Amino acid sequence: MKESKWSDEQLQELLNQLPKIKDDRDPRDIYQAIEIKMGKQKNRTWILPSIAAAAALLLLFILVPNLMSWQESADKQVELKADRSTSSEQIASENNTILEAKEEDSELIAQDKGSEEQDQAQLFTEPEAEINDEISKKTVESESSPTAVYEEDLAGKEVLTYAIPDKAAQNIVPVSVLVDENPARTKFELFEDTMSRLTEDKWGLEDYYPLKANFTYDRGNKMLTVDVPADHPYSMSSTTEILLEKVLSNIMNNLDIEKINFMTEGEIGIEFSHYGYRKEFIPENSNGNLIYYFLYPNGADSTPFLVPLREELNSIKDALLAMKKNRTENNLQASIPEDIDFETEEIQDGKLLIRFNNESEIINDESTLHAIEAILLTAKDFDFDTVKLENADVDKIGKFDLTEELKVPIAANKRDLPN
């Protein structure tokens, strides 16, 4: 800011030049006016606090009920929280009580007191591992059912065994089905009626039945006549002729037939490409015994078929040892594990004793059950009626009670027919 250039004398001169102020009012009038103004100022100072106080009272009147309601709500919230806390503590206490009761019941169950309350508690306190083990055990037992036909299966039933080729035409698989007994029908008639019900393809075998022929059965003479059409499929190759021969041999063996006559559309004889003209079929006498191996046409995880091969062996011991080897030329698997060692002893009255060595591990599983069935079927063909298994690690395998003598099966490879 610039400094003023006016001197004191100049300012005084300028002030003297201003017009003079003159008040002609009486001094009393001036005083009275001042007093009036002072009174108004005092009144204004008193009114404002009064208005403020009134407003405060009004605000308080409005807010107090809300404050009281809020306080009541807050008190209820506190009470509710207290109740909830008490309820949670009570539930926790009850759960602890239940848990303690369950633990006490479990202890009582472990002590095997056998009361009804203990049994009921056991349903809820049984460890999960034990439940899983029980389910697994039931599953194993249900899946590990025998594959052969046994004496107890024949109540009101007739067993029919069909010789069915596998898809590679390497093996003849005996498959047994159960049908209701019918006194009005011969076993061969039941056999013929059931041919069309077989499900070979589902079983992983060749679709072979029903045979393309008409049959006449002479029960008195134990003779069967087979009449084929001119375009029959059994002379296409030497393989088809061999398969037919094996199938017919099986039919004769299972149905007590001694002779089969051949015909073609009512005329005597059948012309074969390999065997030539044949009027009848009489199976050759076969030497040796049937030894059973495993065939898995539906994969290694499926139930195996027990397939017999006829071999000339000196004893049942040699037969059982042979069953520990695979037969790769026939696509057959060993039916007795290689690591299972045993001794055999032939006892009088058709009994066979098999004693496992201490190093052999015998497990209650499906493969061991099927191995036992293979042993029983082979023992049957060696003219044994029962087999006793000793020194096994378990007392039971599937349905087989190893503490008892096991009866040989009636027939191999039981399969169900469609309804």
Image: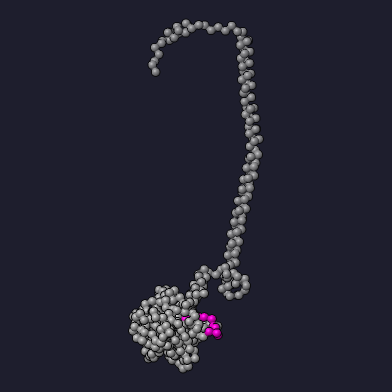
Is 191 or 273 nearer to us in this picture? 273
* 182 in the magenta segment: yes
> Where does residue 104 sit, x and y in percent of width and height?
59, 69
Identify the residue at image location x=61%, y=20%.
41
Q: Residue 112: x and y, percent?
A: 58, 75
Using the rendered view, name the quadrant where residue 345 is placed.
Answer: bottom left
Instruction: Say how many tags the image has.
Output: 0
Q: Which residues are magenta?
A: 176-185
Q: Is residue 402 magenta?
A: no
Which of the pair 197/280 is nearer the observer? 280
Is residue 346 depicted above or below 397 in this figure? below
The quadrant of the rendering that contains the N terminus is top left
216 lies above or below 22: below
The residue at the point 49 percent across, 89 percent down is: 219
Q: How is the image coloured?
A: one colour
Query: Which percent across, then down, holds residue 180?
Result: 54, 81
Q: Nearer the viewer, residue 323 or 364?
A: 323
The front one of 295 and 256 is 256
Q: Is residue 331 left or right of residue 24?
A: left
Question: Which residue does the image show at 59% across and 62% down from the upper left?
Answer: 95
Q: Could one spot residue 238 in this view of the protein?
A: yes
Q: Residue furthest bottom?
A: 348
User: How far from the left and from the top, in percent, is residue 314?
Assistant: 37, 91
Whether residue 400 is visible: no
